[in-house]
Amino acid sequence: MLLSRRGFLVASGSSLLATWQIAATAGPAGAVMVRQSAPENADLARLSGTTNDAAPAIRSYLSGVSGSVTLSGDYVLDSVVEVPRAVTSLQLTAGTKLKVRGDHGALSRSGTIVYRDQLSTAMETKRSSITVDKPTKYVAGEYLLLAGDDAIPAARDRYGYLRRITSVSGSTVNIDKALPRAIRIKPRTALVTLAPSLKLWGSGEIFHLTPSLGRTPLVSFFAVDNPRVSGIDIHDNGATGVLVAHCKGGLIDCTIHDLLDDGETYFGYGVNVTGSTRAVVVRGTMTRVRHAVTTNSGPGIDVMGSAGEPEDCWFEPVAISCSDKSVDTHCLGWNTTIVPHITGGHGGVQVRADNTTIIGGEITGCSGPGISVNPLVAIAPRVSGTIIRNLKPSGTAILADSAIVATDIVIQDCYGTHIVLQSDSTVTSASIVAGGAIGVSFRGSNNTVTNIALGANVTTPFISSAGANNNIFTRATTAPTPLPASVNTAPPTISGTVQVGEQLSVTDGSWTVGPMTPAFTWRRNGVALSNATERTYHTYDVVSADAGAVLTVEVVVRRAGYQDGRAMTAGTVPVALGAALTPTTKPVLSGTAKPGQTLTVTRGVWSPAAQSTSCAWSKNGVPSGDTGTTYLVKTSDVGKTITATVTAKRTGYATATFAPTGKKVSA
């Protein structure tokens, strides 16, 4: 069965929904719980490391204990283990594995949410009270889910908030915090009975044996007071790692990785904060998941439906190589604070919820925008002090399709247009260095961008789309400091035959930052060659003057916005003399070998060209002492063979000689 994202979210909570509905009929105490005697440890030990279902035995064990509990072993679970309320701390020791088999989670803790009343009076924003028709139903200290059918404009997500009753006065029920939004369409209340806090911790693992079959969160908290997860390694599932729904407070600080995500059937959220969850903190390290953390409306509740807006949450995960946006608030979410620590992946932070704050942190190496703001956002997010760097290939550090308020943003080495604004945004004191050539793109109107420090790479401070007006742009009086030089990690090398007349090549070497533009300066015995300085190509033709010298190359890598990086090759062996010159037109001996006649030898044509040639004559191989290109045959030469040897010389090359066939003198 293929599910949309919305369908997946409903389905992913279905197995828990049955538990909540049963619990809702269990009376004032809330959860249905049958205690059994704890089995001998040997019973669990026998199941450890086998393929037998250990879930019933674990449930039985937990039902007989309370307080802090330790679980050790290697167990297969064919059903979810609901942790009893008496257990306040569950430690999974090092080496412990809970291996899910089937479409269900591993561990859950559940309170109850039961529909109570529909109100005739709207719940207004910024008011710390609601007006009820049946005040006797409400008691100070209770928790309520306040919801209705009011939804995000252009979306189906419906508001809903977790509130504690502080007092009741007549038809006025006072609550511990004002509502951020009005609920006017069929306002309803539900009693929230929060399950006691559970701390799940240790060094154990929770994972699905066949991730493609897992459509349910591995760990689920529903209506829990202060749920906590720390240290546990949660991985390999076709759905969420940890689900936090309609909870109060809590800390999720664990490792979650390798959750499936295809955007159709599998939505591997690291931590999914849903419903009216209030003030939960998410930290930990999330790798290769869809979103490290995200927000959603809550799973369905009888009469109340699927409603709830996570509120006052703090998200500070370390997100690595996420397949979608690393941190993504869906349309629901109020007063969310995000401190990004994001490396790689498809994108940085996507804001779809109102009243979001992004503060500090760093977003680096993503392929999508660093921070994007969805067009549905009505209350501008605030961004301050965030560093966004090395975004490729889109390179857009801030993509605001709705208003944004940003201050003290540092953008480093991002390709493309750095800041893209629709309308009504304010960006103050940003720094843009290295990367793309365009600073800001005004797609809409009424934007104010001031005190922007631009590096040398920004040759176009801003552009405006047709129809965009009333935009203000001012540049800072000082430019940002260039980024540190790229560091050489593998030195450049020279290759080729180190000999006069040969061609050598040099490599770029390896650098920490790329791509860079290299330049090459060749040096002879350490002295830069005037005709081979700052070359943009890699080759050098060894010349006569190099003979006997040691050659090196200094490589300088540059990119606008960076300081120059430098590296030197190792020196070559001393340059050898070039190979001996070769005659391309060989010397020729001509003339009549008789007394009184003259013999002539040509000097030939040499490659490379000879700087000098000389001729020496011999009789029967014995030098005669004669030089020059002619020889007068003597009577005493009769019977002897006259030869001529031509010697060709060029500086830096071995001396070459050539002797054409001699002539025997006759009478």
Image: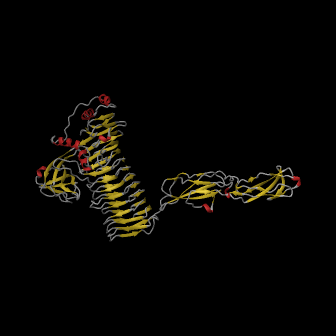
- What is the x, y in percent for residue 306? 20, 50
Total labels: the figure holds: 0
Task: State the colouring used for the structure image.
Answer: secondary structure
Question: Is 261 or 313 nearer to us in this picture?
Answer: 261
Question: Is 548 or 88 nearer to us in this picture?
Answer: 548
Q: Residue furthest bottom?
A: 470
Answer yes or no: is residue 17 visible: yes
Residue at x-position 20% and y-position 60%? 125
- What is the x, y in percent for residue 483? 47, 59
- What is the x, y in percent for residue 261? 32, 47
The correct choice, above or below, for 36 with respect to 301 in the image is: above
In the figure, is residue 509 to the left or right of 253? right
Residue at x-position 79% and y-position 51%? 662
Question: Is 605 or 356 nearer to us in this picture?
Answer: 605
Q: Residue furthest front?
A: 667
Answer yes or no: is residue 650 visible: no
In the figure, is residue 483 to the left or right of 201? right
Question: Is 420 or 301 nearer to us in this picture?
Answer: 420
Placement of the N terminus among the 4 image quadrants: top left
The correct choice, above or below, for 465 with respect to 329 in the image is: below
